[in-house]
Image: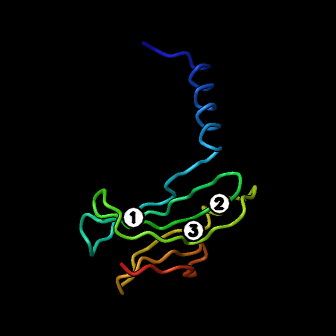
Amino acid sequence: MTSDPADAAAQAIANFRAGGYRNTWVHKSVRLKARPGSRAELRCDLDPSRFRLEIVVLEGATVRERATVMETLPDEIIFAHRFKTRRDEGNNVTVLHSSGEAVFRLPV
């Protein structure tokens, strides 16, 4: 049975409204070569009162580390496109600005 696209759109809007107009997404995910089965994700969380960028380290589906990289008021400019991650030699996951400058390190 195929649902009507207008009904599906209306339901999606109702769910978004019921959830407090909150949008969450994974901006970037990278495998950690030194820890097989692990990965680091940059996760974004946006609602009417704030924008938050978090780094989450997972082993399989289990969260091992989590830290807030930045939290700010929401703005028409979303900050997520300005960040990327990489694995450091010293067992750190580093969040880099798009310019290459390290802005946050999380030991793993």
Q: From mark 1 to mark 3, how far is it between C-alphas?
A: 13 Å
**Residue in the foreground of this view, choosing between 12 and 37:** 12
Total label count? Answer: 3
Left or right for 27, reference 64: right
The structure's colour scheme is: rainbow
Q: Residue at x 65, y 52 (%)?
A: 47
N-term-proximal mark, 2 vs 1: 1
Q: From mark 2 to mark 3, how far is it between C-alphas?
A: 14 Å
Instruction: Please give the label number shown on residue 51.
Output: 2
The image quadrant of residue 13 is top right
The image quadrant of residue 81 is bottom right
**Residue under numbered circle 1:** 30
N-term-proximal mark, 2 vs 3: 2
Q: Nearer the viewer, mark 2 or mark 3?
A: 2
Q: Work out which residue is located at the far right of the displayed protein and give it.
A: 76
SS for dot 1: strand
In percent of width and height, residue 70 lies at 60, 71
Instruction: Please give the label number shown on residue 83.
Output: 3
Tell me which amino acid carries mark 2: Phe
Q: Quadrant of the N terminus?
A: top left
